[in-house]
Image: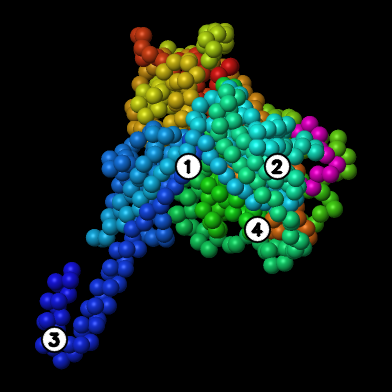
Amino acid sequence: MCQEKNERKHVSSSLKSGKQEVMRLQATLFVLLQLIFELSSCTQLQVTQGSTLELPCVMFQSDISGAAITWKFQGKDVSPQSTGPVRVKKEGLYLSISPVTSANEGEYVCLVKQDNVEMISSYNIKVAASSEYTIKVSQGSEAYLPCHFPTGGQVSANAVWFRETDAVKKMSLNLDDDSRVDNQRFTLLYPGDSDQTVLIKDTVMEDAGIYHCESAAGQKLSTVHIIVEAAPTPPPFLCKGMSTAWEPCEDVRSRTGEPILQESLTDFSMKLYSFLRESNPSSNLLFSPISISGMFSHLLLGAKGETRKVIERAVCVPHDFHCLHVHMKKLREKLSGSLQMASQIYYNPQMNLTESFTNQSIEFYDAKPTRLLNGSEENTQMINSWVANKTNNKITQLVDSISPSTQLILLNAVSFSGQWKVKFSPGSSNGLFTKLNGDMVKVPLLYHKGYMTAMKYVVELKAQVARFALSGDSSLYVLVPRTYNVDDLQQLEDKMTDEVVLRMIKEIKATTPHAVEVSLPRIKLDVQPNMHIVMKKLGLSSLFEEANLCGLYSEDRLVLDDARHRAFLALTEDGVEAGAATAMGFARSFPSFSAMQPFVMLLWSDQANVPLFIGRVTDP
C-alpha cells in the first residue's frame, strides 16, 4: 500500500496540479482504510447455560441482500441445514443457539462477501454455569430475578429461591405460581419450565439484598443482588398527541405485505408452540396461532409507544408495518370459506373509547366494541352467547364470570370445518392407542385400506409425515415420531422451527400421493390454554399492569383485565371440524400410516400459506 502511494506521488509530480492530486489520492486512501476498519467487529459475550442466544451477522444497518454469508465456529463451517442446538436462520442473517451449553463456548465468525467487500463479525462466547446479576430498581416498581436450568429438558421440580439474611444464613422464599393471587408479591413466573424467573411486585426498600437460585438437588444456578432506590415522583400520564388513529397503508396493492404477514404468522406459531409445550410437556395441546395473532393485532390498533413495540415483537411483525391490519382483513376474507374467526372487545361503560379505534375496529376486524352490562351474570351470558354464535355452538362457554371492576376484555373465537377430499371407509371399528407411559387404550378408528395420500419419512424431523387434503384448499399434516417414547416426541418438537416446518410442507407437497393403509383415531379436543402464562412468555405482562392504549382510550392509563383463547377440534368420518389431526406407520399389503401413538398435527391453509391450528395428541 505504501509503495503504491509513493509511485502515484511520483507520477503526479509531472502534472501541473501535482500538489492537489497528491492530496486527493491521500484522502481517498485514508477513507478506504477507515471503511475496512468499520466493517470488522468483535463482541465478547457471557451467557448462562440453558438460555437462548441469537447472534446477528451484521451489527449495523446495511443492505446485504444477495450477499454470500457463512458462519464458522472455532474455525469450522456451520452448515446452513443444521437442525441441532446451533442453527443458521433467516438465510444466514442470524445464528441461533438454543439451549446454550458449555460445548457452545468459543469463537463464532460471520463472513459476508458482497461487491468485493468483506464484512466480518466475530463473537467470543463464554458460558457460565451459575450467573451473577446486579439489578437496580425503583421503590414501587417490579423486579425480575433471572434463573435458568442448564438444559431445555423436562423440569422435574421447580428451583428453590433463598435470600441471604447474613454471611452464613439464608431464608427460603415463599413463592406462588399464580400471579393473580391478591397480596402475593413474590411469584414464580413459569412453574415447571426451564425459566425459573421470579417476579417481585411493588418493590420496597427492605427487598434490597442478595438472592440465590438453586436446583432441588442443590446446584447453584444464579445469584441476584438487588439495589432498591427511592422512587422518583412520576409525571402525570397524558395521552396528548398519542390518541391518533393507526397510520394508513400507503400501498394496499403491494406484493410485499402478504409474504411479511405469512412469515410472521409461521414464526409466531412455532414460538407459541414452544412456550405451550414447555408448560404442558405431556398433555394434549391445541391452539389457533392465527386466532391469537389476530387478537393481539386487533389490540395494536390502540397501542402506542412502548406498548405498541412489545406487542409487535410478541407477534413477530416488523415495527411500523402499517399495512398489518389491511392484510389481516384480506387474510380473514380469504379463509372465510372454511375458517370462521372473530375478535371482540368489551369495555367498561364508564369509558369513552376513541372514535378512531371504534371505526378501525369495525373496518379491519368486523368488531364493534361493546359496553359491558351492569351485572356479572349478565356479562358472562352476553360474552358466552357471542362465542357460541361465532363458533357455530362448538364452544358455548369461554368465561365463567366477569369481575365488577373489569375495564377491558379482549376476546377471540375460531371455528374450522373441512371435508376430507378422500373419504374414509364407512362403518366403525376400534384400535389400541399407545400413550407416552406405554399404557394402551381402546379408541374408535378412522380407517382406509388404500387411502391416496402423500407420505414420507422426514429425516430432519425424524418423523413419518402424511398430508390429508381437505376442502377449502387446506391440508392436515400428521407428524408421528419413531416411537411412542416421550424422548422421541420431544426430539420432534425441538426441531419444529418455522424454517423446518416450511421445508417439510414444501417437501411433502412435492411427494406424489400413493395408496396407503391409514388408521387415525377419532378425536375431540376442547382446549383452553392459559393465556396469562402465554402472555408472560411473550413479554406482554405489562398489558395487565399499565399499558399505553391511548389510541383506544385517551383519558387515563388502561389495563387489560383478561384474555381468553379456546380451540375445539373434531376428527370425524366426514372431515375436520375446528382443528387438526395427524398419524404414522409401516408396510403390509400397502404401506401403512398409523397415528395410534402420540403425534403432532398441523392444520395448514394451502391457499394463504399460513398455519390455522397446531396441536399435540397424547391421550385421545
Check if residue 406 falls in the magenta segment: yes
* Label 2: element kind: strand
**Marks 2 and 1, Cα distance to the nearest angstrom?**
23 Å
Disc number placed over residue 412 in the picture, else none? none
Q: Nearer the viewer, residue 464 or 73?
A: 73
**Marks 1 and 3, Cα distance to the nearest angstrom?**
58 Å
Q: What residue would you read off at disc 1?
A: 47
* Label 3: element kind: loop
Q: What residue would you read off at disc 2?
A: 200
Tag 3 and tag 2, C-beta contact below 8 Å: no
Q: Residues within 10 Å of mark 2 (few under 14, many from 20)?
A: some
Q: Residues within 10 Å of mark 4 (few under 14, many from 20)?
A: many
Instruction: Tell me the magenta residue range.
Output: 399-410
Q: Residues within 10 Å of mark 1 (few under 14, many from 20)?
A: some
Specify how the rendered protein is coloured. rainbow
**Disc 1 residue type?**
Val
**Horizontal relation, residue 210 to residue 437: left or right:** right
**Marks 4 and 2, Cα distance to the nearest angstrom?**
26 Å
**Marks 4 and 1, Cα distance to the nearest angstrom?**
32 Å
Instruction: Identify the mark nearer the N-term, 3 or 4.
Output: 3
Q: What residue would you read off at disc 3?
A: 13
Instruction: Identify the mark nearer the N-term, 2 or 1.
Output: 1
Q: What residue would you read off at disc 4?
A: 304
Residue drawn at x 54%, y 12% as measured from the top left? 437
Instruction: Identify the mark nearer the N-term, 3 or 2.
Output: 3
